[in-house]
Image (tube, rainbow, N blue to C red):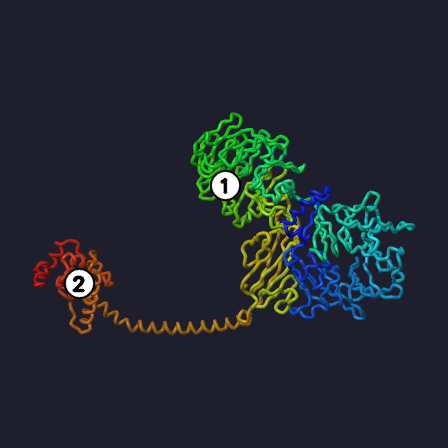
């Protein structure tokens, strides 16, 4: 039953019906919630028989197959197996406790061990001389001593494992166990030795002596001091809870009522006992179940009915402890171990049991609203419109009402509460808007608004909004209407506006309309419209008091629209959105956004980007799915959310505005090359506040947790590695690891921080030093070699470069004579007959000819461009060509071109125009004159002669 209650919501829903029908729920039950201990599937065995929370907040579980540490996300198991052979002599964990040095001491059937939490190094406790090493209990006293009970002895140790003394424990000359070691307010030591009862330590005699021996109350399992009545509560085996008052010499023991099981049978065999901080109940695990007792004014106990939250069935339970938050953790053998959460819950659940009974199915609330008389109106999928009295748990269907039984309310699209009367505006499955009211849950029709009276094709109604001036704004799939309520006048604002998905108001004079894939429309007091274009699939819209519009899209975006300047800013990342469609946005009185998707509700504060999440995946959350139109804010104290399984309400608060709680984030694990360094020092070694890793182990994964087991869905983390990350890396809720790949050598500081349960960032930053050792080629001596080699290579380069410069200087000096000759050649004004100068003449002509041939088609090629291509001045070039050829430079160019013209004209396919263009001439006349001046005939005559 417990497993069904906590894990399978469909079973839980059925159970809720049964419980609420047959049980008169006590007022305190609303403050108590039962949930499964998380991550049980990661344990080596599901059964837990020891639970302990250390001073940091880690939860430690003792199982039949190892010691387990839980950090809120993962389980770390310590045991002997093929990976860690001979780590423990036995894996059965009998007891867990922490000493004053923050070391974990744990017992097994074959000895005790000390665990260093920072390194996970395990040291066996020396129990030499003890034959039976089954550790029964371990306790720590105020002086830091650790007391270990084994059969026949009580051993006192220092925190370093040094034995202080050994007390022989016998009863009737037979070795026995100590059940508990308890230190009272005066510092006196009490122990329980069954079947001898309580014993008190006599410091003078250095021995334990019987303390108020009683023939019945001998098997004492637990002791709790009760300050209010200055007495002790003793949990016993066989006689239940006993009130013990040492100051009452005549009657120190007062028996209390025994726990009574579901069959009415008393049971007096108690395992463990704890007192909660909220209701001050005594909670006891017995051989049959968990029981709670209220302390009456006279100081005695009476049993509390736990059936409203605890399935009434026999269970095999072990330990019960109280954690730092005041929650009770209960270990079980034949059921899932669970947590008893005693607190005032910010969410309230409405499973709608009357609806369940009527439709014999799980509620599916598609739209909801409250009227001003706090009557709930909602639409159930495939069932239609209903009114519901939450206080009396009564329901009325629209077909049971005379006014509405023939109207199309089998599916209500949306509701809107009227601001001026006890009326609810309703969109049904036609083009009519209905104003409804109820009298004793009977639904009456007040107003019918026929949209087709204003326009023939009104479109399908999609959304409603009643403003502060008695106007009802109606959006449809293509148009926007305004209905003046007092005058009952319907007018059309725009008939071709587009699909309207939401309407909001920033002031009395300004209405804003979200239009799918078109933009935001502003309607002023004179009913003039202005559209701010935006090609976004808008789904919903609401406004904060500062005139900012917040819009959700089907692509999962949260957009901030400034109504003053029309700017749109994307807030999807600050809001922590993941791309899920935004079903709805509601702005509360604190200007917080309530963002609703199919899977979660997110309260977001735009002022500091803090947010908290309510997730349908949480087994404690009633709803399995949230539906788009099933949201209502009553503007007073609650926001109601509907969906699959019923309705929940959440009260807005200023918790996202306050000072963050002091939250410490712990480094829970470091994996190097995908292997945890905890209990594995083969590739790592620890420093005072960090780790040293080998050069080849460059991939590091760091896990962390704030150890807030009850608000994991609210907690987020931010981390950075100095020298690698310039900014904080902020993780989404549920993520608690950082990964770095191929870290260079060096010393790094890893920093991490967390939010508190309200989404506010803590100022507490946890640091971890990471030293990545260098490879041999990154070491200091290697760098000395590199410097030596670099110096030698640089010296050699300098030597070679100097030799090259000297060689170039000699060549330059040798070439100077040639330069003088070339200068003389260019400056000459008459031909030289020397062989050497004639070669230079031919080289110049060849180069000039080549330049002309390369630019035949360039109409702008002239003497100047020829001189540039020859790297000579025009005058020098012209002078040299005249001396060599007897022609001017212009005639030199023309002769080469006309020679090419002859070759082209001799072709049978080329036309005179083709030749002219190929040679860079722009008109026929100049080409003809140039050709005729050299060959004496026109180009056409030359071509005719050549073809004949």
Q: Quadrant of the C terminus?
A: bottom left
- Nearer to us in this view, 556 or 510: 556
Q: Secondary structure at mark 1?
A: strand
Of marks 1 and 2, which one's residue comes earlier in the chain? 1
Q: Residues within 10 Å of mark 2 (few under 14, many from 20)?
A: some
- Nearer to us in this view, 209 or 476: 476
Would you name the residue on which mark 2 appears? 879
- Nearer to us in this view, 486 or 407: 407
Marker disc for residue 939 = none
Q: Quadrant of residue 112?
A: bottom right
Relative to 372, say whether 296 is above or below: below
Q: Quadrant of residue 76?
A: bottom right
Q: How far across and how far down the image is residue 750, in percent?
A: 59, 58
How far apart in space, not on screen, are marks 1 and 2 (Cα)?
Answer: 79 Å
Q: Nearer the viewer, mark 1 or mark 2?
A: 1
Taking the image as drawn, is residue 613 in sight? no
């Amino acid at each position: 039953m417990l497993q069904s209650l906590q894990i399978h919501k469909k079973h839980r829903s059925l159970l809720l019906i049964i419980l609420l029908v047959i049980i008169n729920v006590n007022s305190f039950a609303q403050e108590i919630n039962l949930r499964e201990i998380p991550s049980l599937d990661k344990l080596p065995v599901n059964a837990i028989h020891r639970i302990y929370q250390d001073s940091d907040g880690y939860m430690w579980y003792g199982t039949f197959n190892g010691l387990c540490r839980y950090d809120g996300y993962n389980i770390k198991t310590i045991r002997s197996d093929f990976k860690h052979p001979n780590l423990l002599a036995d894996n059965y964990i009998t007891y867990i406790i922490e000493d004053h040095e923050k070391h974990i001491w744990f017992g097994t059937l074959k000895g005790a061990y000390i665990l260093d939490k920072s390194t996970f190094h395990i040291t066996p406790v020396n129990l030499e001389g003890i034959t039976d090493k089954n550790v029964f209990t371990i306790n720590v006293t105020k002086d830091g001593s650790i007391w270990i009970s084994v059969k026949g002895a009580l051993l006192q140790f220092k925190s370093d494992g040094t034995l202080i003394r050994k007390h022989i424990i016998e009863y009737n000359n037979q070795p026995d166990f100590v059940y508990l070691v308890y230190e009272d307010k005066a510092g006196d030591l009490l122990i329980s030795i069954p079947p001898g009862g309580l014993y008190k330590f006599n410091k003078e005699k250095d021995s334990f002596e019987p303390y108020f021996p009683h023939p019945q109350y001998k098997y004492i399992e637990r002791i709790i001091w009760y300050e209010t009545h200055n007495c002790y509560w003793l949990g016993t085996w066989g006689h239940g809870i006993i009130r013990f008052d040492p100051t009452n010499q005549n009657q120190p023991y007062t028996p209390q009522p025994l726990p009574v099981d579901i069959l009415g049978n008393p049971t007096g065999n108690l395992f463990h006992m704890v007192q909660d901080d909220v209701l001050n109940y005594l909670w006891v695990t017995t051989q049959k179940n968990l029981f709670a007792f209220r302390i009456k004014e006279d100081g005695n106990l009476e049993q509390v009915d736990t059936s409203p939250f605890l399935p009434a069935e026999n269970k095999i339970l072990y330990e019960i402890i109280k954690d730092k938050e005041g929650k009770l953790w209960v270990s079980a053998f034949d059921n899932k171990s669970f947590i008893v959460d005693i607190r005032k819950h910010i969410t309230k659940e409405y499973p709608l049991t009357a609806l369940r009974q009527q439709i014999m199915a799980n509620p599916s609330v598609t739209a909801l609203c409250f009227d001003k008389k706090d009557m709930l109106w909602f639409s159930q999928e495939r069932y239609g419109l209903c009114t519901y009295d939450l206080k009396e748990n009564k329901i009325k269907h629209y077909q049971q009402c005379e006014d509405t039984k023939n109207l199309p309310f089998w599916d209500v699209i949306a509701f809107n509460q009227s601001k001026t009367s006890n009326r609810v505006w309703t969109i049904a499955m036609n083009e009519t808007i209905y104003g409804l009211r109820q009298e004793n849950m009977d639904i009456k029709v007040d107003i019918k608004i026929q949209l087709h009276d204003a326009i023939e094709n009104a479109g399908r109604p999609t959304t409603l909004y009643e403003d502060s001036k008695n106007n009802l704004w109606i959006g449809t799939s293509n148009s926007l209407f305004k209905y003046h309520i007092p005058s009952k006048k319907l007018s059309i604002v725009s008939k071709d506006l587009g699909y309207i998905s939401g309407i909001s108001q920033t002031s009395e004079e300004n209405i804003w309309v979200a239009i799918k894939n078109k933009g935001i429309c502003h309607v002023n007091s004179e009913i003039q419209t202005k559209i701010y274009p935006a090609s976004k699939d808008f789904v919903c819209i609401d406004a904060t008091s500062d005139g900012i519009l917040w819009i959700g899209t089907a692509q999962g975006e949260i957009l901030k629209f400034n109504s003053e300047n029309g700017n749109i800013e994307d807030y999807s990342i600050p809001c922590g959105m993941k791309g899920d469609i935004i079903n709805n946005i509601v702005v509360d009185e604190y200007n917080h956004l309530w963002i609703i998707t199919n899977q979660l509700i997110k309260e977001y504060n735009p002022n500091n980007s803090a947010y908290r999440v309510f997730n349908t995946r949480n087994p404690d959350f009633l709803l399995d799915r949230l539906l788009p139109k099933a949201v209502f804010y009553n503007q007073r104290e609650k926001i109601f959310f509907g969906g699959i399984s019923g309705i929940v309400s959440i009260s807005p608060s200023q918790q996202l505005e306050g000072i963050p709680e002091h939250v410490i984030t712990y480094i829970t694990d470091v994996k190097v090359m995908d292997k945890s360094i905890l209990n594995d020092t083969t590739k790592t070694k620890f420093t005072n506040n960090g780790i040293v890793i080998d050069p080849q182990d460059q991939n590091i994964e760091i896990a962390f947790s704030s150890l807030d087991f009850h608000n994991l869905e609210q907690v987020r983390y931010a981390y950075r590695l100095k020298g690698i990350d310039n900014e904080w890396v902020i993780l989404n809720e549920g993520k608690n690891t950082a990964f770095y790949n191929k870290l260079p050598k060096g010393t790094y500081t890893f920093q991490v921080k967390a939010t508190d349960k309200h989404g506010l960032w803590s100022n507490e930053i946890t640091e971890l030093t990471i030293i990545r050792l260098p490879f041999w080629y990154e070491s200091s001596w290697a760098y000395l070699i590199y410097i030596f080699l670099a110096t030698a290579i640089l010296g050699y380069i300098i030597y070679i470069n100097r030799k090259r410069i000297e060689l170039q200087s000699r060549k330059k000096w040798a070439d100077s004579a040639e330069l003088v000759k070339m200068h003389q050649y260019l400056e000459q004004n008459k031909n030289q007959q020397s062989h050497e100068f004639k070669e230079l003449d031919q080289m110049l002509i060849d180069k000039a000819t080549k330049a002309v041939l390369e630019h035949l088609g360039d109409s702008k090629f002239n003497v100047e461009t020829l001189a540039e291509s020859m790297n000579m001045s025009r005058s020098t070039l012209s002078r040299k060509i005249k001396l060599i050829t007897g022609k001017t430079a212009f005639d030199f160019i023309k002769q080469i071109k006309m020679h090419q013209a002859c070759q082209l004209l001799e072709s049978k396919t080329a036309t005179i125009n083709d030749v002219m263009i190929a040679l860079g001439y722009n008109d026929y006349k100049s080409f003809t004159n140039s050709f005729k001046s050299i060959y004496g005939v026109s180009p056409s005559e030359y071509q005719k002669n050549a073809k004949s």
